[in-house]
Image (cartoon, rainbow, N blue to C red):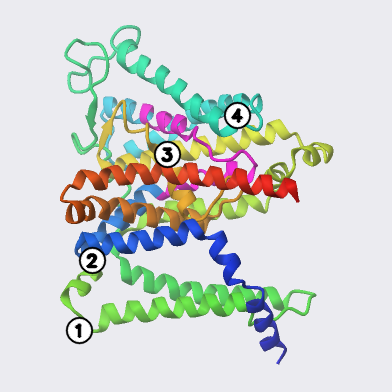
Amino acid sequence: MNNVKEIDKGFEKFSIKKFLISHSVTILFVIVCLIGVKLSKLPLFFIASELLTRMTRNSFLVLSLIIPVLAGMGLNFGITIGAMAGQIAIIAVTHWGITGIKGFLLCVILSAPMAILFGNLTGKLLNKTKGQEMIASMIAGFFANGIYQFIFLFLIGTFIPMKDPVMVLSSGIGIRNTIDLSRNVGIKYALDNMVKLPVFYVLLAGTILFILSYTLFRFYKIKNSNKNSKFFTATYISKMIFCIMIILICCVLLFNKDIPNNIKMLTKIKLPIVTCLVVGALCLFNVLIVKTKLGQDFRTVGQDKHIAKVSGINVDKVRVIAITISTLLAAWGQLIFLQNIGTLNTYGSHVQIATFSIAALLIGGASVSRATIGQALLGTILFHTLFIVSPKAGKNLFGDAQIGEFFRAFVAYGVIGLSLGLHAWKKRMQLKK
């Protein structure tokens, strides 16, 4: 009886009006994506396959934005600088001819000290521009891009000796615009192709494992707790219902022979296991770091810098650490991104990284002051679903695929502007109250 009351109490707190207002951007994009899928008339197999590829490719970069938001620094447009560190490492490793997973791991090692240095310098700059971190990090990215292009256009082949006819321009000065990462095997798919398994078998096994481990964890936690906690809470029941639905869907797709062939083809999609484990490790890192002293410092600084300072926290140091971690993760995220793409656009691959990652995060329901792992992953799904279907939907609706391309760019910049406007409006309303 008490358990039922606890569940009812949990559902009473849920307000439909509040939910719709809080998640208005996400709900809008769910509707837009569904309309886009319908208008594009693309096969479900193609959309699902492309979406899975884009999810594994981009999730790490989007997740790298969470810690600065937690620390009250807003959306870190400076992840572009981290992406440059990753690209510098890729250029060096490709020039040395180190391929496969060894080449990829060497890129990870080489990019780390550069990203830490760049992140540290960016953090110190942002400490001088408190309250204007987002615009300052954006300008810092533009400035760093100028230095990056100067190095690879003019210093390579002059002050920095490099003789590689494949990578260097015919004049002997500057790196070519495009570098093929599959040359002599290269690092293309170095991470993705290590282990690949059918996605629905992985999902089925993973969901069953989650149910068992989560139930045992709750049982152990309640048994060893001094409080009179209830086992069957609204949160627990909702999670179990969601997991059972996933299991049923997987079983129908895998073992029912009567389903249509176009849906049955979904079972042939394979999941890059190692890449997913790396993304999962970052999610776990973001969860665990909040429970540490440093994570609590991030929270405190994000809520109120003055109170944090009075509490004895070195605010400037904590902010620098937050940006440095984000920059380092962005460098590694760019490596994952490029090994999947297989081509490095020397002067362009990093340019839109921050804009698209931030747009994805905001579409998931995040704001300038709050972002979660779930919002990052949901936003990545919605944003890239729109990217997949919009050209074809634009062609079918208006007779021109280019309109779909324009719409994608409009969405990316528009959602950032809308989110910043809503944040400023909410802040003003809070001050009036």
Q: Position of residue 55 (x, y in %)?
A: 36, 54
Which of the numbered marks, if any, corresponds to residue 355?
3
Q: Residue at x 56, y 38 (%)?
A: 325
Q: Callout 3: 10 Å neighbours few (<14), some, many (20+)?
A: some
Task: Say which residue label 4 marks.
Answer: 123
The answer to whether residue 61 shows anywhere in this view is: no
Instruction: Kindly report which numbered mark, 2 or 4, lies closer to the viewer in this rendering.
Output: 2
Task: Say which residue label 1 marks.
Answer: 257
Q: Quick check: is 60 in the magenta stretch?
A: yes
Task: Say which residue label 2 marks.
Answer: 44
Residue type indicated by callout 4? Gly
Which of the numbered marks, if any, corresponds to residue 384?
none
Instruction: Kindly report which numbered mark, 4 or 3, lies closer to the viewer in this rendering.
Output: 3
Q: Quick check: is 99 in the magenta stretch?
A: no
145 left or right, relative to 346:
right
Residue type indicated by callout 1? Lys
Q: Secondary structure at mark 1?
A: loop
Q: Earlier in the sequence, mark 3 or mark 2?
A: 2
Q: CA distance from mark 4 to mark 1?
A: 57 Å
- What span is in magenta? 59-88
350 left or right, relative to 171:
right
Q: Earlier in the sequence, mark 1 or mark 2?
A: 2
Residue type indicated by callout 2? Leu
Residue type indicated by callout 3? Thr
